[in-house]
Image (cartoon, rainbow, N blue to C red):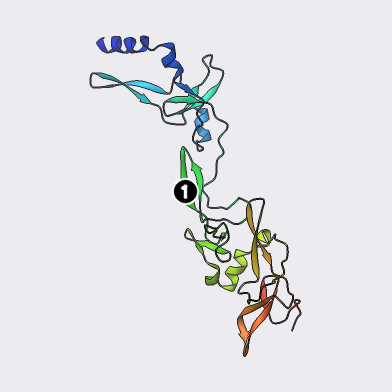
């Protein structure tokens, strides 16, 4: 009986201002499970419980549906003990598939699982491009392997093709105007905030180092990303 009286006293002493503090327009976390929406909304985002002879207050778990409106016409979600209004959550699958446009600039990404936001690796062989502090690519494109971007200089010929799929070769063909010999016939450009690959052209200025050079002649010319023995993509 004393416990019930104590609870009644606590509830009766909550002023209207106290109740108002249970509601907030503060932005919620980005990851919530859509399954939470099928739960019955709570009247408030906390509840009373007994600890020995003491009555204490505890918050419901973040993401619990709650009645944001006093007239039960608007449902929100609990956030740190307050009911907040939020848009329908955007769920990002944790399947390791890269769905964003352009190259993955990291081999990890953030996904949602239930109420959690997780940092998980992309699947192996996902094309990747490391961007340095200068905002430019560090080396050429690689592929993700166990959460790390395997660098371009360490790729096999087959892996070089995996790092440059047709869907990521969207930069216009480019003339090589420098005096250096190219070690890769690809270059990279940024379009709409995303990174893509492109070819150096096959003019005589686009000299490159061949992976398997002929004896006494280690140089070739670029042709659609490959280093060949003749310029203008001519056949031998």
Label 1 Cα neighbours within 10 Å, binned few <14 / some 14-19 / many ≥20 = few
| x then y, percent, for residue 155 | 55, 70
Quarter containing the N terminus: top left
Q: Which residue is mark 1?
A: 119
- Residue 50 higher or lower than 224, as above or below: above
- Residue 12 higher or lower than 102, as above or below: above
Say if residue 36 shows up in the picture. yes
Of 12 and 175, the residue lying toward us: 175
| x then y, percent, for residue 4 | 30, 11
Point 43% across, 14% down: residue? 17
Q: Is 78 left or right of 171, judged from the image as shown?
A: left
Of 212 and 200, the residue lying toward us: 200
Tag count in the figure?
1
Point 62% across, 90% down: residue? 216
- Residue 188 higher or lower than 9, as above or below: below
Of 23 and 8, the residue lying toward us: 23
Quarter containing the C terminus: bottom right
Point 60% across, 74% down: residue? 183
């Amino acid at each position: 009986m004393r416990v019930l009286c104590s609870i009644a006293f606590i509830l009766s002493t909550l002023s209207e201002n106290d109740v108002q503090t249970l509601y907030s327009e503060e932005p919620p976390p980005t990851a919530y499970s859509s399954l939470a929406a099928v739960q019955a909304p709570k009247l408030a985002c906390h509840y009373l419980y007994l600890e020995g002879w003491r009555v204490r207050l505890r918050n419901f778990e973040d993401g619990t549906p709650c009645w944001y409106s006093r007239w039960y016409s608007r449902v929100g979600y609990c956030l740190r003990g307050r009911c907040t209004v939020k848009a329908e959550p955007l769920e990002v699958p944790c399947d390791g598939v890269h769905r964003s446009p352009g190259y993955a600039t990291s081999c990890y990404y953030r996904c949602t699982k239930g109420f959690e936001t997780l940092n998980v690796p992309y699947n192996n062989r996902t094309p990747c491009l490391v961007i340095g502090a200068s905002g430019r690519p560090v080396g050429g494109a690689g592929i993700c392997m166990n959460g790390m971007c395997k660098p371009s200089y360490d790729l096999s010929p087959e892996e070089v093709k995996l790092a440059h799929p047709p869907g990521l070769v969207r930069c216009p063909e480019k003339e090589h105007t420098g005096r250096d010999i190219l070690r890769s016939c690809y270059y990279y450009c940024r379009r709409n905030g995303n990174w893509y690959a492109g070819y150096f052209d096959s003019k005589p200025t686009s000299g490159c180092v061949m992976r398997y050079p002929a004896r006494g002649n280690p140089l070739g010319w670029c042709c659609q990303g490959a280093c060949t023995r003749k310029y203008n993509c001519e056949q031998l």
